[in-house]
Every structure is written in C-alpha cells, then in structure tokens.
Image (spheres, rainbow, N blue to C red):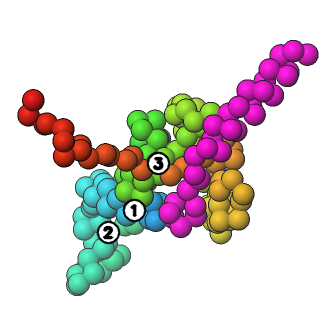
Amino acid sequence: MNSISDSREDIVKKKREVSTLELAGFWRRFVAVLIDLFALAAISSVILLIFAPYQWFGFGGFWGTGDVFEEPVWRALPYLIGGNLLSLIVNIAYFVGFWLWRGQTPGKILMNIKLIRADASNVSVSVALLRYLGYIVSGAVVFIGFIWIAFDSQKQGFHDKMAETYVVKIPESTITAPSPKMSLGG
C-alpha cells in the first residue's frame, strides 16, 4: 500500500517539474520538423543518387532521349530497395541519435526547444525508439497524431503520449553585464 502512494507522489512530483517549463506549441514544433525533413531529404537524395543511380537504367534523365524501357525494370529494383532501406536507417539514426545525444535535432536547436521525459530527464534508447515508432503512428492517418499537438492541453502528439515525452522551450539565459565600477583586468 505504501509503495502505491509513493509512486503516486513521484508522478505528481514529476508533473510539477515539467509544469514549471513552458511547453512548445504546434507552430514552433512544425517549423523544427520542417527543418529536419529538409536536412533528411538532402541526405536521402545523396544516398539514393549514390546507391541507386537511375541513369544506369535509363531512368531519371529528365532531358534524356533514351527509352525508359530499354533496360528491364527489375534490374533497378535491388538498387531502389537498398537505397530506400538505407534512407530509412538514416532517418531512424538521425532522430533517435539526436534525441539521445542532447534531446534536440538540428530543427529543435534552431527553434530553441528540447525533448524531455516527464521528470525533465533525457530520453533513453527505448523511449527514443518508441517515440520514432510513434512518429509512424502519428502520420499514418492524415498526420492527425501531429495535428493533435495544437489541440492537446499538454501540447503532446500521439508519439509524445506513447513515449511519455514533452517538448519544451529552452529558457532564455540572462547574461548580466559587469558594472562599470568592476575592473576586468585585475
């Protein structure tokens, strides 16, 4: 009985810690994800150009005069599958890696927001992977899991609720200038 009340007290304490931080809203998070998606699109494009060069098969030549059906399509299939699998691995590594490293992807860094747990701690590997899986769930049906952030009182999408994470604004640090009476040189 005592352990149940202790765990409830811990939960209330954790909620208070998060409630002192300002939650990041939908638009700030949206811009951060757009920045990340732009970076990932550039990385994935390079991977696909290197791993699956369509020009080998007569594909992708916008101004080309060759017939698309000169080479059998099945010959390009392993390259396309391999390139897309590599892009998926890069996507997972990008998000999970940055979340583990500092709780911020480059988009979140630029938007001055951070991913945290309910107790204001950093995420673990299992939480980061669960949150990435939540990204898939959130986007599965017309991105409703992401849009939900705009309407949720805790500013959580489905992926945040699944992983029990929050995205908060990083408090601005105040730097005080030395007073004119202080000597900087000694």
Q: Point out which mark residue 71 bears.
A: 2
Instruction: Identify the residue position indicated by label 1 in the image.
Output: 35
Real-space Cα separation, disc 1 to disc 2, in angstroms: 37 Å
Q: Residue furthest left?
A: 185
Considering only vertical position in the picture, is 85 above or below 56? Answer: above
Instruction: Identify the residue position indicated by label 3 in the image.
Output: 171
Considering only vertical position in the picture, is 118 above or below 173? Answer: above
Return the x and y of residue 94 as percentages of the image width and height. Answer: 41, 46
Q: Amino acid at mark 2?
A: Glu
> Which is nearer the N-term, disc 3 or disc 2?
2
Magenta residue check for 23: yes
Real-space Cα separation, disc 3 to disc 2, in angstroms: 58 Å
> Which is nearer the N-term, disc 3 or disc 1?
1
Considering only vertical position in the picture, is 43 above or below 21? Answer: below
Return the x and y of residue 53 as percentages of the image width and height. Answer: 27, 61
> Which is nearer the N-term, disc 1 or disc 2?
1
Q: Residue furthest right?
A: 1
Q: Amino acid at mark 3?
A: Pro
Return the x and y of residue 76 as percentages of the image width and height. Answer: 36, 60
Per the image, label 1 sits on a secondary structure element best described as: helix
Tell me where the magenta segment starts and ends, as one range: 1-30
**Considering depth in this image, is 64 or 47 the residue closer to the camera?**
47
Image-based side of 36 in relation to 30, left or right: left
